[in-house]
Image: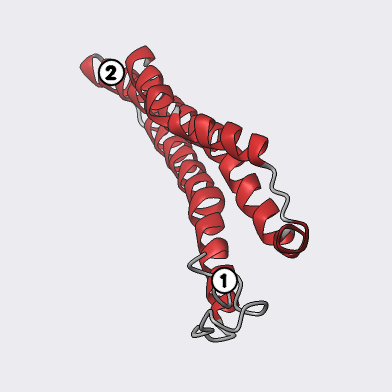
Amino acid sequence: CWYAKAAWGCESDPAVPCERGEDIGNLAIIMQLTAICLYFIFPPSVVISIYCWMKKKQKESSRRNSIGMTIIRENARKEMMHSAYLQISLYLFSFWFTYIPTLISHICTLIHQTYQIMTGEHIFNFYIIANCVYAVQGFVFMMVYFTL
């Protein structure tokens, strides 16, 4: 309701004041695109950069002539970096798994907003499923944390 161009029932009921401007729709689009960038563009770019950094460090360590404890340290560092990469990737995919239904419900709301206003029908079943999956996000993150 906060990003609607006018209060509900503003056009049909003259008693309801229409106080919002027409440009609030642009704000909603900007906020949705920002959320999409934060959730689907920024995290993969961070994971890819960490992966490339790990590969670069592995190549640098393989070029050096290492002996003794240095080899053991480099192998331990490789294993730690690989497990950190796996944990970051697992967190990211579990976040997407729990957030995508909510994102789809928001997109459906934006696309079908006119249809919902005209007919009064909502897709409540999907909203309930999306909210339940989103509420399970903390449990999923806890499982990822304790399994790694």
User: Which of 3/48 is in front?
Assistant: 3
Crowding near the residue tagged with mark 1, few <14, some 14–19, many ≥20 C-alpha atoms within 10 Å:
some
Above or below — where is 110 with respect to 44? below
Given this view, does label 1 or label 2 mark the residue nearer the observer? 1
Which of the 4 quarters of the picture holds residue 91?
top left
Label 2 crowd bin: few (<14), some (14–19), many (20+), radius 10 Å: few
Side of 105 relative to 89 (left or right): right
Q: Amino acid at mark 1?
A: Ala
Give 57 or 44, whichever is nearer the viewer.
Answer: 44
The image shows residue 81 at horizontal and vertical percentages of 37, 28
Q: Nearer the viewer, residue 4 or 105?
A: 4
Q: Residue at x 53, y 75 (%)?
A: 27
Which quadrant of the figure has residue 144?
Answer: top left
Answer left or right for 88 relative to 98.
left
Residue 141 spot, x, y in % from top left = 39, 26
**Residue 102 placement (x, y as % from top left):** 57, 43
- In the image, is residue 131 above or below residue 110? above
Find residue 138 and report its image quarter.
top left
Q: Earlier in the sequence, mark 1 or mark 2?
A: 1
Q: Label 1 vs label 2: CA separation?
A: 67 Å
Quarter of the image containing the C terminus? top left
Q: Amino acid at mark 2?
A: Ile
Q: Is 56 displayed left or right of 76 in the figure? A: right
User: Tag 1, which secondary structure?
Assistant: loop
Residue bearing the label numbered 2: 67
Q: Secondary structure at mark 2?
A: loop
Query: Do the residues under discs 1 and 2 have CB atoms within 8 angstroms?
Result: no
Instruction: Kindly identify the residue that appears in the image at 52 percent across and 37 percent down.
Output: 131
Picture coordinates of residue 20 (x, y %)? 51, 83
The total of numbered circles placed on residues is 2
Residue where numbered disc 1 is placed: 4
Q: Kindly identify the residue that appears in the image at 70 percent across and 61 percent down.
A: 113
